[in-house]
Amino acid sequence: NAGVTQTPKFRVLKTGQSMTLLCAQDMNHEYMYWYRQDPGMGLRLIHYSVGEGTTAKGEVPDGYNVSRLKKQNFLLGLESAAPSQTSVYFCASSFPGKKEQYFGPGTRLTVT
Amino acid sequence: AQTVTQSQPEMSVQEAETVTLSCTYDTSESDYYLFWYKQPPSRQMILVIRQEAYKQQNATENRFSVNFQKAAKSFSLKISDSQLGDAAMYFCAVYNFNKFYFGSGTKLNVKP
């Protein structure tokens, strides 16, 4: 039982490049979330999903897209990376009734 | 939008002593949940304690307890008998309508 995993753990991009972050969970959770963490700002919600095939915007969705084609996977895409997207990205998942989130280990992304 | 405020960016405590971390929040909802998460240098987010807003009794988990003041919208975390392993960033979070809102965090230092 791996819990929530994120791929990759580290990545360096040049401005304008694209990439996809993968989040996978093996706990059969319905809900999945993508956050970014910046110094002094805590975690901010980018996008989330309450079930396979559904997604919704969070607090800071601009510049990101997501897809939830399979229940266990939640992908975060950056179409044209900008230095302002340098951050640590966390994925989390939960059951609807439990409210408790389980977090992945994070991905450190640097955009130069 | 809901806001979560942690007014203490950094705190220190002597090993075996007690420390209280503060958190206030702003929500117009009556049904919500409150959490404290710990983030050690490993970056992994770990749930410390949770509180349902409809419950008057304060939650307790071993050395961790909360002081929940619903009318004042205050949710502080008390750590008793502090240990070196308690050194970490601590985040307060509010859950409502499928989304979590996090504070900016308090860095806790534990002195031997």
Image (tube, helix red, strand yellow):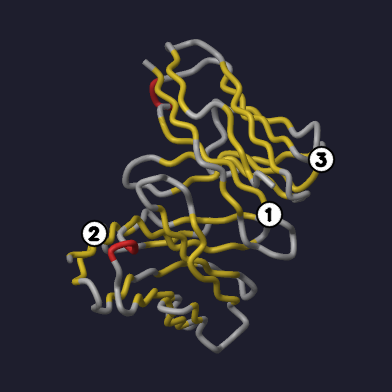
In the picture of the structure, the residue carrying the numbered disc 1 is A94
Callout 3 and callout 2 share a chain: no
Circle 3 SS class: loop
In-image side of B90 versus A31 (left or right): left
Q: Quadrant of the C terminus of chain B?
A: bottom left
| Number of residues whose C-alpha sits closer than 10 Å to that of mark 2, classed few (under 14), some (14–19) or many (20 or more) | some
- CB of mark 1 within 8 Å of CB of mark 3? no
> Hey, what amino acid is under mark 2?
Glu
The residue marked by circle 1 belongs to what chain?
A
The residue marked by circle 2 belongs to what chain?
B
Q: Position of residue A53 (x, y in %)?
A: 82, 36
Residue at 18 percent across and 65 percent down: it is B111
Q: Position of residue B4 (x, y in %)?
A: 43, 61
In the picture of the structure, the residue carrying the numbered disc 3 is A52
Q: Is residue B103 above or below residue A25?
A: below
Q: Is residue A76 above or below residue A15?
A: below
Q: Position of residue B58 (x, y in %)?
A: 50, 85
In the picture of the structure, the residue carrying the numbered disc 2 is B10
Residue at 32 percent across and 47 percent down: it is A40
> Hey, what amino acid is under mark 1?
Ser
Please identify the residue farthest to the bottom as the structure is shown.
Answer: B57
